[in-house]
Amino acid sequence: MDGHNYEPLKAHILPLSQAQNFDLARREWSLVAVELSEEWDNCPCGQDIKEHCFIRNGITGAQTYVGNVCIKRFIGIDTGTLFDGLRRLSNDPTTNPNAAVVEYAWKNGFLYDEKEYGFLLQIVRKRNLSDAQQAWKLKANRRILKQTVVARRTRR
Ligand SMILES: [Zn+2]
């Protein structure tokens, strides 16, 4: 056991869901936002987390968050390489965002336009960028980080 306990998580999610069978209830939820924080917080399962996945119930409209492990293990939503990419970006804002980060940023309106979206996808694996491309990437990276990394968060 690594501290991600099913029972407390279930006890948190079920009252916010329509279905009372957890396997059905978890399907009501979708990911709406993610956040990297610099302070520890707690997942409803009790585990310390710094990676928040904000989820919304499509039927009840309830919102809550769980950690990056529980979202996959219990809710069944795979965030893929999104958090790895965000973590890498927050450690070094000059790196190229990975495809998961670019997709996430596009879907959440953090990118300026479709051209920027295409540009970022194009450079995912590119090493040599021109100065202009480097500057463009940095601008986009800062916008992405501003919306996903928080220094302090008020407990909800
Ligand atoms: Zn958890």
Image: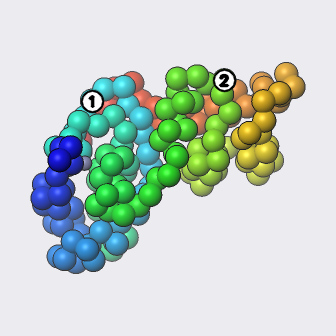
- Residue 131 at what x, y percent from top left? 85, 22
Q: How is the image coloured?
A: rainbow
Near mark 1 (Cα within 10 A), the count class, few <14, some 14-19 or many ≥20, is few
56 lies above or below 39: below
User: Residue visible at 36% across and 43% down?
Assistant: 52
Is 85 left or right of 10, judged from the image as shown? right
Q: Nearer the viewer, residue 48 or 13?
A: 48
Q: Nearer the viewer, residue 64 or 22?
A: 22
- Residue 80 at what x, y percent from top left? 50, 52
Q: Which mark is residue 94?
A: 2
Give the farthest residue toward the front: 1
- Residue 37 at what x, y percent from top left? 38, 31
Q: Nearer the viewer, residue 60 or 134?
A: 134
Quarter where residue 132 is shown: top right
Sequence order check, earlier mark of 1 and 2: 1
| Residue type marked 1 | Trp
- Residue 145 at what x, y percent from top left? 54, 32
Q: Which mark is residue 40?
A: 1
| Residue type marked 2 | Thr
Residue 73 seen? yes
126 lies above or below 138: below
Near mark 2 (Cα within 10 A), the count class, few <14, some 14-19 or many ≥20, is some
User: Residue visible at 64% across and 47% down?
Assistant: 99
Q: CA distance from mark 1 to mark 2?
A: 26 Å
92 lies above or below 75: above
Quarter where residue 76 is shown: bottom left
Is 153 left or right of 116, judged from the image as shown? left
Where disc 1 sits, the SS reads: strand
Q: How many marks?
A: 2
User: Residue visible at 42% across and 39% down?
Assistant: 35
Q: Nearer the viewer, residue 113 or 38?
A: 38
